[in-house]
Image (cartoon, rainbow, N blue to C red):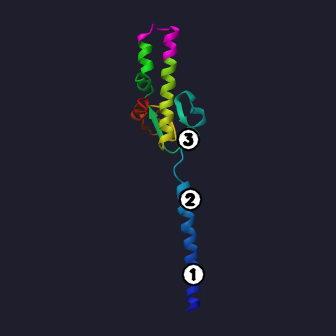
Amino acid sequence: MIENMNRLGSPLIILLILLYFFAFNAVAMAESMAIPPEAVDDQRIFWGTASSFEKPGSVDYNALVSATTEYKEAVKAEKNTAQYWLFISKANDRAIRAISSVGSETDFDLIVLKGYLEGLTPPIETEDITELALAQLSN
């Protein structure tokens, strides 16, 4: 009887070890993506690291900047004056802060300009987070 238990025990232990190995590596096996180094455009990446990400988001940056009070003030100012560019700079800063807030408060580990990742070969699908960023502007 004990001999039969030993024969069953070895395969069972091996099976448990394999299950343990696969269970913990399944998390590590989550699909990690990267932007090819030759396609990295830092001007289109607002949050995260291009070399490794799992949940990319994209934002309509023009819509976000246009929604700021600073941009609305810039439109009222005379174009190309110091005051105009000051408002534009503040509008851009505020948009970037809103995007950063979304990045730090959600699971999105890369946030880029809308259309950037979809235009790569092969394309990378993103979720549009513009509404989340617009909500941050009101905070």
- Counting from the top left corner in percent of width and height, residue 116 is at 48, 31
What's drawn in magenta, residue-wise?
76-87
Provide the residue designation for mark 3: 34
Residue 107 in the image: above or below residue 130: below
- Counting from the top left corner in percent of width and height, residue 21 is at 57, 64
- Counting from the top left corner in percent of width and height, residue 18 is at 56, 68
Of mark 1 and mark 2, the one earlier in the sequence is 1
Residue 40 in the image: above or below residue 72: below
Looking at the image, is mark 3 or mark 2 nearer the viewer?
A: 2
Residue found at x 53% / y 9%: 82
Magenta stretch contains residue 58 = no
Q: Residue furthest front?
A: 139
- State the residue in front, 50 or 121: 50
Circle 1 — which element?
helix
**In the rendered structure, which amino acid carries the disc numbered 3?**
Ala
Residue 25: image tag: 2
Looking at the image, is mark 1 or mark 3 nearer the viewer?
A: 1
Circle 2 — which element?
helix
Neighbours of disc 1 within 10 Å: few (<14), some (14-19), many (20+): few
Residue found at x 58% / y 84%: 7
Provide the residue designation for mark 1: 9
Of mark 3 and mark 2, the one earlier in the sequence is 2
**In the rendered structure, which amino acid carries the disc numbered 2?**
Asn
Figure quadrant of residue 136: top left
State whether residue 27 appears in this view: yes
Instruction: Answer with left or right where residue 2 lies relative to residue 113.
Output: right
Q: CA distance from mark 1 to mark 2?
A: 24 Å
